[in-house]
Image (spheres, rainbow, N blue to C red):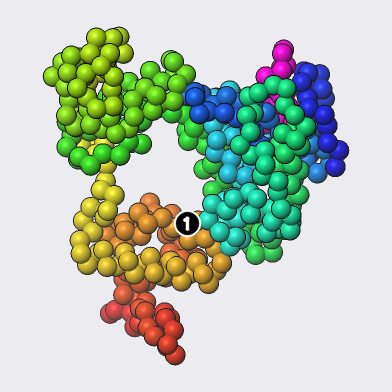
Amino acid sequence: MHIHPLITDSQSLADLCERLSTSPFVAVDTEFMRENTYWPDLCLIQIGDQKEAAAIDPKADGIDLTPLLNLLVNNEDVLKVFHAGGQDLEIIFNMTGGTPHPLFDTQVAAMALGLGEQVGYSNLVESLLGQSLDKGARFTDWGRRPLDARQIDYAIGDVTHLATLFPKMLERLRKTGRGDWLDQEMEKLADPTNYANDPALAWKRVRISSRKPDVLGRLKALAAWREIEARSKNLPRGRIMKDETLADVASHPPANQEALARVRGLSAGWKSNDIGARMMEALASAHPLPADEMPQREDRQPGLGKEGALVADLLKLLLKIRSRESNVAAKLIARSEELELLAAGRRQGLAILEGWRFEEFGRDALDLVEGRLAFAIRNGKLAMTRTEAET
């Protein structure tokens, strides 16, 4: 494989992208910093196929990234391969308003191959290629210039290994017949709505114990205000106001701006500064959360009841058994919320009752809930047994 020097000019990048546009797939990775900013600070982009690979400096003076972004977002003939690419996709979405498509994520594929849930990249490389990665440059300052040779070698290594990994994983998926399973998962990952941080939905990321509509309404208004403040100042959300302070203010709203000086987590200056005034305006605009926006309880689904909770626990046991038998990560097959909904009587709109998930797990899960399947002990081991259908 040919490794290019660091690309810092537009012509070299355009030439690289023209060659890669004829490849069946490209491996992609990014290096970025976001500890002190709201928006990720893109510091390096690595891309390659089985013939060549390069690192591109997006901070290089005058470099035009348009050919690269077109290859990633607009070229439907080239498959884009990432590992745990959520943050990479977010960066590309922020730059273009779109996401790479078609898409393949090796971390998701690893779950279908029984290699673990959320398997790390270095572990995947060691498992499939038998190589140990140098992690020394992992936490380097990617924003510093000039980048040294070790940083660039480390970064390009990610895509050269990825370009070698992908065909091996694809062959395993073909042999096991599980390639089609992943199509839907990859389409979900590529959905641009995953990466658009809507201020109106920001409150859902904040943990709060209250389920009172007025409290949650204030939380929604405050979280949206914080999101807008963080964006405008390009600061992390927590630098504007920490989650626990946000939840505390929503639960116990101050009577006036002067009272902000007594709120734990806020400086005394909030009682008279502009940001404190804007927060109070957001608080004043809040309305109780409508019934159709109220969150479901995290512990159990509504209407599950004690008996239903026991059934849900049996379903989780069945999932564990089926996951072990099929050598597929349980997380890829079903989520706990789906099992609880099935136990509570839901039969529509559940992924486990459709497609490959139904064949691998959903049919047995439905039979267990409806009394056609039971647990039994045989020769000291847990087993499943069919019961007579009810008449």
Circle 1: residue type:
Lys
| Residue 5 falls within the magenta-colored stretch | no
* Residue 323 seen anywhere in this rendered image of the structure: yes
Whether residue 230 is situated above or below residue 156 in the rendered picture? above
Magenta region, residue range: 55-72
Question: Residue 141: percent from the left, percent from the top?
Answer: 62, 29
Question: Residue 193: percent from the left, percent from the top?
Answer: 47, 33
Would residue 305 appear left or right of 156 to someone viewing this image?
left
Residue for badge 1: 331
* Residue 77 seen anywhere in this rendered image of the structure: no
- Using the image as rendered, state which of residue 12 and residue 35 is in the foreground: 35
User: Residue at point 72% right, 12% down?
Assistant: 62
- Residue farthest bottom in this picture: 379
Question: Residue 112: percent from the left, percent from the top?
Answer: 58, 58
Question: Residue 334: percent from the left, percent from the top?
Answer: 44, 58
Total count of labels? 1
Which quadrant would residue 96 be assigned to in this image?
top right
User: Residue at point 64% right, 62% down?
Assistant: 177
Q: In which quadrant of the rendered image does the N terminus lie?
A: top right
